[in-house]
Image (tube, rainbow, N blue to C red):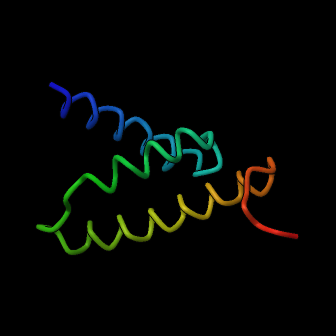
Amino acid sequence: MEKNSEDLERLQLLDIVFTKGVNALSKEELERLHDLLEKKDYGHDKKAKKSKTKLLKKIGNAIYDHEVKYGNSFKMS
């Protein structure tokens, strides 16, 4: 049952990303989506695996942007 709820959550977050962009999600939602995508195995589909990698990069950049914008970054300036 846990798997189905995680799949549903992943799909809901992905829907938001594809309709409104990664900036529409909070940092916590981005981190959750990142974790859910990391767990999901797309090994059977080369194109889906490539899309997953690109999306994880975008999510990582958006998380970093949130950290810089709101002062939670380890960046020294």
| Image side of residue 13 versus residue 59, left or right | left
Q: Position of residue 16 (x, y in %)?
A: 50, 40
Q: For the N terminus, which image quadrant?
A: top left
Question: Where 74 sits versus 21, above or below?
Answer: below
Question: Where 29 sits versus 71, above or below?
Answer: above
| Image side of residue 49 versus residue 59, left or right | left
Q: For the C terminus, which image quadrant?
A: bottom right
For this rendering, which residue is in front, 57 or 11?
57
State the residue at coordinates (29%, 32%): 8
State the residue at coordinates (50%, 68%): 57
Outermost residue, right side? 77
For this rendering, which residue is in front, 66 or 7?
66
The part of the image, by quadrant, that contains residue 6 is: top left
Q: Position of residue 39 (x, y in %)?
A: 26, 52
For this rendering, which residue is in front, 67 or 61?
67
The number of numbered discs placed on residues in the rendered structure image is 0
Q: Position of residue 25 (x, y in %)?
A: 59, 41
State the residue at coordinates (80%, 53%): 69
Q: Position of residue 75 (x, y in %)?
A: 76, 66
State the residue at coordinates (59%, 45%): 20
The part of the image, by quadrant, that contains residue 3 is: top left
Outermost residue, left side? 44
Outermost residue, top side? 1
